[in-house]
Amino acid sequence: MAPGLESYLIVFAVAAGVTLAATPVVRRISERWGLMVEPGARRVHERSTALLGGAAMFAGFLSAIGAAWALSDFDVVFATASEPVGIVIAALVMTACGTYDDVREMSAPAKVASMVLAGSILSFFGVTVLNLRLPVLDALILSQDLAFVVTVLWLVAIANAINLIDGLDGLAAGIVAIAGLAFFAYSIKLTEEEVLLPNNIGPLIAIIASGVAVGFLPQNFHRARIFMGDGGALFLGTLLAASTVSVGGRSSEPFAGQTYFLFAPMLIPLIILAVPVVDVLWAVLRRTRARTSVAAPDKEHLHHRLMSLGHGHRRSVLILWLFTALMSALVLYPTYTEEGEVIMVPAAAVLVLMLYIVFHPILRRRTA
């Protein structure tokens, strides 16, 4: 029998509460040790800000995993201990390597190697893509070698997407909070439809990722008193990758709500995470055309472009949060209603939001 909603809410509260309590402590430690991010040409913040936010989020994550393990409702999820252990180890690796990069700065190949290591750990412990359903086509049962490659590439892609979108106060944390909650709701529906087995760990990791992000936001929203850094961004990316692999890579049976996404479960997280996914694809294309390193930093990301259009720091963040919420609605509406027409509601809202983004700064300049 699958865990009940009340148990998931308890785990969410533990993740958010512990992160909320740990963040100020970590901030003071960071300030005492002089681990600060100074303002610079590549940054938009205007004052020295503490690092190490990833450590606070990891504490919230461990506490939430411990709470879930202590609740008998999750016995079915922890019956096979390998997957939870693998996710904890992979998250620790990414948090540690990302934090080291925040403090000492790692080379791009070394960072990619750490992501490959984390993806390898997930695959080794069984958190891997078993079935890959391509649009319209039947599900493919992957060989062990191919499943390993797909899992590692998926983690590298998601982790980098979250890392690159972390350019404004609260932006990445808010997107993960919304996306994690949306993917939790999606995976719960799949469990109810018996498309997923009750022991699937995906919903648990999704709700923990959302809770950790919510707990971190009060100290991270503009003007941020602490940054998550690469340690936090790569950590959150690992949780989202583990959750989406566990759900999208295990749901081989189609159901009515998937019709509007070509019966391809792995498309769902890409739609929910459209903001960071589009941003990372645009960054790769932009830097490839400029013949610079893919890892070379710049100020041409989506959030930078919003600010250059005239939207302020907070409004730019809220716009991208809203866009993530609308894309999540685009997934959840047909999933829960099985009515394709309802897609037009969030689709129209996305169009209105895009028009607002473009024309609002122009109208303000004309009326000024």
Image (cartoon, grey):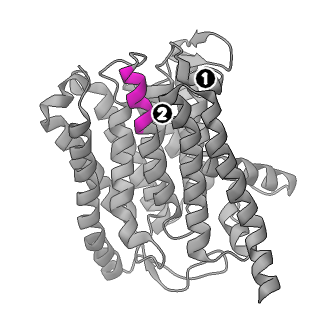
Q: Position of residue 96 (x, y in %)?
A: 39, 54
On the picture, is 115 further left or further right than 33? right
Look at the image and tell me in which quarter the N terminus lies. top left
Instruction: Give the crowd class for mark 2: few <14, some 14-19, many >=20 residues within 10 Å.
Output: many
Q: Amino acid at mark 1?
A: Ala
Residue under the point 45% across and 27% down = 247
In this figure, which residue is indicated by the disc labeled 1?
A: 264
The answer to whether residue 312 is left or right of residue 115 is right
Please state the horizontal and vertical placement of residue 183, each as a whole percent of the image. 46, 38
Q: Residue 244 — which label?
A: 2
Residue occupying the point 42% across, 30% down:
187
Q: Is disc 1 surrounded by few (<14), some (14 to 19) or many (20+) residues within 10 Å?
A: many
Kindly identify the amino acid type of the residue bearing the numbered disc 2. Answer: Thr
What's the residue at 71%, 61% (across, down)?
296
Rendered position, 135 above or below 341: above
In the rendered structure, which disc, 2 or 1, sits on the residue that comes first in sequence? 2
Q: Quadrant of residue 16?
A: bottom left
